[in-house]
């Protein structure tokens, strides 16, 4: 069926191509979007919000982009997720998301206004953002640079009368410039899933779900010393650059870095030692690290 929320916008797409469980398009939804080069901390937040909002009954909508979008989709697979594509529903972009796109088709829903076989052009990505926001009751922005395409989604959401939520970021992190600007311009600040649930509850005429207090920090990741009889992995500039690209001012642990980069834990540990010696990162105990001041 056609998403009822999208049907209510001023100029809804006349036709949608859908693959997957169409029932998910009839449920209340929240969009989670953000930076393609999302930090490890940002991706962790996206997974947290997607998981808890899913448990509260919301389908998670996003655009299957790298970074924040992918993290939200992955965390929402069990409870329900909708990917809105700029190309046809049989077109895979980015190519490395083939597996994730197939999982969403099997367990969630793929949506596009373009016919099968259509290869997206640059102008098609901003255009599809109005569908992402149109399907949802609210749009949550997790990390966005000042000129990020994510801000187009936020603008379209506001024009459609949707709630716009943003997670505040460190003022020195370029990935937070856009979200912090949204907050200055009237977006609702949220720091935990319960904030979103409470804001949307009046629209559903129900009480926010209880037991969603996420203030308690997760336990630190256990130390994983490398066995002394194994050679240390080779670490080069590409590994350093990959780690630095997902680090920000907020401390994250080795497990989060492994999830964000796909690198082995032992490789990350060796690289972090070298980066710390070079003054590129700071350590905060319990394997927590962040970019050193002035490195953003």
Image (cartoon, rainbow, N blue to C red):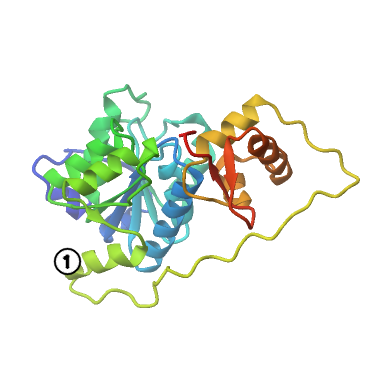
Q: Is residue 1 visible?
A: no
Q: Position of residue 135 (x, y in %)?
A: 24, 50
- Nearer to the camera, 202 or 95: 202
Q: Position of residue 134 (x, y in %)?
A: 20, 47
At x 25%, y 69%, the residue is 198
Query: For the C terminus, which image quadrant?
Result: top left
Q: Which residue is mark 1?
A: 203
The image shows residue 192, relative to residue 7, as above or below, that is below
Q: Residue furthest right?
A: 229
- Nearer to the camera, 112 or 46: 46
Q: Position of residue 279 (x, y in %)?
A: 60, 35
Q: What count of labels does the image hold?
A: 1
Looking at the image, residue 141 sits to the left or right of residue 185; the answer is: right
Q: Position of residue 241 (x, y in %)?
A: 58, 29
**Badge 1: residue crowd in 10 Å (few <14, some 14–19, many ≥20):** few
At x 35%, y 78%, the residue is 210
- Nearer to the camera, 47 or 108: 47
Q: Is residue 67 visible?
A: yes
Where disc 1 sits, the SS reads: helix
């Amino acid at each position: 069926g056609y998403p009822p929320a999208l049907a209510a916008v001023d100029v809804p797409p006349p036709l949608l191509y859908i693959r997957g469980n169409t029932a998910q398009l009839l449920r209340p939804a929240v969009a989670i979007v953000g930076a393609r080069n999302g930090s490890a901390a940002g991706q962790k937040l996206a997974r947290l919000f997607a998981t808890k909002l899913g448990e509260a009954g919301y389908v998670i909508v996003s655009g299957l982009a790298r970074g924040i979008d992918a993290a939200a989709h992955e965390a929402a697979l069990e409870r329900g997720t909708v990917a809105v594509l700029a190309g046809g529903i049989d077109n895979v972009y980015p190519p490395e998301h083939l597996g994730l796109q197939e999982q969403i088709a099997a367990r969630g829903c793929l949506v596009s206004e373009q016919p099968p076989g259509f290869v997206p052009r640059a102008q098609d990505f901003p255009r599809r953002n109005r569908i992402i926001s149109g399907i949802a009751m609210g749009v949550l922005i997790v990390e966005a640079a000042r000129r990020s395409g994510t801000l187009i989604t936020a603008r379209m959401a506001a024009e459609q009368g949707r709630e716009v939520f943003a997670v505040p970021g460190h003022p020195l992190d370029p990935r937070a410039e856009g979200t912090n600007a949204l907050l200055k311009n009237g977006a609702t600040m949220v720091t935990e899933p319960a904030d979103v649930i409470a804001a949307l509850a009046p629209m559903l005429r129900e009480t926010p779900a209880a037991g969603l207090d996420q203030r308690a920090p997760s336990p630190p990741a256990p130390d994983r010393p490398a066995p002394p009889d194994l050679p240390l992995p080779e670490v080069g500039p590409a590994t350093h650059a990959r780690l630095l690209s997902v680090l920000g001012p907020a401390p994250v642990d080795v497990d989060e870095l492994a999830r964000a980069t796909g690198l082995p834990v032992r490789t990350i540990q060796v690289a972090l030692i070298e980066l710390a010696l070079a003054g590129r990162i700071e350590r905060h105990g319990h394997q927590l690290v962040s970019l050193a001041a002035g490195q953003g």
